[in-house]
Amino acid sequence: MLRLRIVATALAVLFGLTAARADSLSDFYKGREVTLIVGFGAGSGYDVYARLFARFLSRYISGQPKIDVQNMPGAASLRAVNFLYNDAPDDGTVIGTFSRDIPLIGIAGNNPQARFDPAGFTWLGSSSSFANDARLLFVRKGAPVGSIEEARRPGWPPLVLGATAEGAATFDATNVARDALGLNVEIIANYPNQYAPYYAVMRREVDGRFASLSLTAQTQPNWLRPDGDMRVLMQFGHATRLSKFPNVPTARELARTAKARALVELAELPYRLSRSFVAPPGVPSDRAKA
């Protein structure tokens, strides 16, 4: 009987503490607004994911706060990252999502505009997986360069690729193709969003671009047709070939040296994060868990 009383008392205390924590969270979040910062403009892939996520998030937080999505584009989401790390409230009322490649900028430490430490964020999780996706190198048929071999051939014209800003996946994958894989690539950067390079290819301003399979399937499905106007030359962000593209080599396969392969693997690390959500440093652990 004594043992049963001890167990019952312990359970009562445990449930009491759990209820107290739940009540504390409910009291804090009830009637409040949680701001979800998106590092890209309205209509971007990250914006679509964030707004879909926001529709359901409230019901899973004790107190059911309103979720308000705010866009903060700039420098491929670096502006939003700096805000989240340095200026956003750390009380659990602000969270954010940004380019998966941004942590590499913080780790590399060679961008004076990056004012954050990736390890300092309160990492919350990801809304998706890149397991069945890849960033593909699309090149229009009829471009001066039509294969990886030609892109590596001395004296051949450069492969002109459209990209957004530093920190965005399109930009970083293009840099890897040039610096690690030895492709003669010319980068036309600073397109305002991830859709603009699609139109640049179709207007023949550039020869091609890196783009994710998922986004291309949604916005330019004709690019994936075998009899369409585009060739797929490379898979980036995926360690092995996707079943949909069994004859297209991965970036790791195209690496000629161990150092080049190591650079490719480093650049592909962010794809394990996929579309991450974070809170500022120092958010109370119970609110971060909630």
Image (cartoon, grey):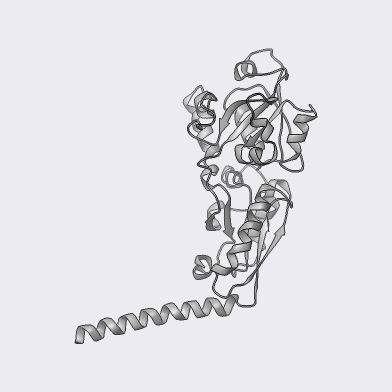
Q: Position of residue 87 (x, y in %)?
A: 67, 63
- In the image shown, does 163 or 227 lie closer to the viewer? 227
Where residue 137 sits: x, y (%)?
Answer: 63, 29
Give the camera-side residue of 56 and 136: 56
At x 53% / y 69%, what residue is drawn?
A: 287
Q: Is residue 125 above or below residue 3?
A: above
Quadrant (top left/top right/bottom left/bottom right) for the N terminus: bottom left
Q: Quadrant of residue 72?
A: bottom right
Left or right? Give the position of 213 relative to 189: left
The image shows residue 31, relative to residue 86, as above or below, that is below
Residue drawn 67% across and 31% down?
Answer: 223
* Above or below, 251 relative to 93: above
Where is residue 24 shown, x and y percent of the image?
52, 79
Residue 129 appears in view:
yes
Is residue 113 visible to the viewer in this orientation of the structure?
A: no
Of residues 286 and 215, the one nearer the viewer is: 215
In the image: residue 46, left or right of residue 205: left
**Residue 133 at what x, y percent from top left?**
55, 39
Residue at 56 percent of width and 33 percent of height: 236
Residue reaching furthest to the left:
1
Q: How many marks?
A: 0
| Residue furthest out toward the top | 155
